[in-house]
Image (cartoon, rainbow, N blue to C red):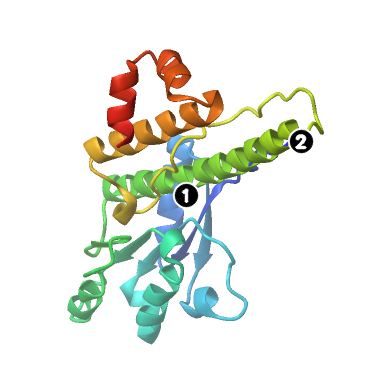
Amino acid sequence: MAQKTPRRNFRIAVVDRAGLAGQLESIAREKEWPVDVLSCSSALEIVGDGGPGPLGGLVVSVAASGPFLTDLMRWTESSVAQRIPTLLIGAGRPEDEAAARMVLGRDHVQWIGADPSPAQLAEWLVVALEVHELRVFRSEHDSIAQSLREARMQLFHGFISTYAPPEGPPCGPPLPTTVEEILRLRDARSQFERAHIQAAVREWGSLKDASTALGISYTSLWRRLR
């Protein structure tokens, strides 16, 4: 049986030489959010060989990034499926214009001018936390779906006689974890409906039995499968 993915605290790194990390820690404590903040004074602590490992979010002050801002932005998108939600904070200096341009075309990066308010920081944390939770949920979904497939094969071959499915999220179509994967609601509903009907047909073995189980007519079921 598949094990549920262990829940880890949401872990972010802050590249800054002022009190930005402390601000984020205070917000997380006040809201009682499961956030661990790693304070870094140099971009090399992120992109260097001894980097922090997996992160759920990254906050970068332009003033502290130095000449490595481009490397940091590339590092956050090294995996399209697991791009790291990033907050880029201006320095209130001329280099802000070039830094802000790096946000263009990067949906996972948000730009905020110098001296962000606690409300702005909290708003970004909420979005980053939601992405983190969706990814954990999707990992659980995939693990449970694999467990069910394996159990079905074992039942088919007679290796086990009974099976209790693991607790966890429903094994429908994978949830989106990036902006590009989000469908229009009508398209997502159609995708789920088709997958559900196909599963019913596969399990019942005939369109007639599947239509009865689904509570729709045989003709309606056939039309929806076309």
- Label 1 SS: helix
Check disc 2 and report its element: helix, strand or loop.
Answer: loop
In the rendered structure, find residue 157 and report the number of the disc placed on it.
2
Q: Position of residue 123 (x, y in %)?
A: 30, 45
Dot 1 alpha-carbon crowd within 10 angstroms: few under 14, some 14 to 19, many 20 or more: some
Query: Which sits earlier in the primary sequence, circle 1 or circle 2?
Result: 1
Residue 138 appears left or right of 83: right
Q: Nearer the viewer, residue 40 or 50?
A: 50
Q: CA distance from mark 1 to mark 2?
A: 53 Å
Which residue does the image show at 48% across and 26% down from the upper left?
A: 200
Location of mark 1 (residue): 25
| Residue 19 seen | no
User: Relative to residue 68, is residue 9 drawn left or right?
Assistant: right
Q: Nearer the viewer, residue 115 or 161?
A: 161
Q: Position of residue 142 (x, y in %)?
A: 56, 44
Which of the image's four quarters has the N terminus?
top right
Looking at the rendered image, the quarter that the C terminus falls into is: top left
Residue visible at 40% across and 43% down in the picture: 130
Identity of the residue furthest to the right in this view: 159
- Picture layout, residue 43 above or below residue 165: below
Camera-side residue of 29 and 49: 49
Instruction: Tell me the crowding category of disc 2: few under 14, some 14 to 19, or many 20 or more residues within 10 angstroms, Cα based.
Output: few
Please give left or right for residue 133 compared with residue 90 in the image.
right
The residue at the point 33 percent across, 76 percent down is 63
Residue flagged by tag 1: what amino acid is it? Glu
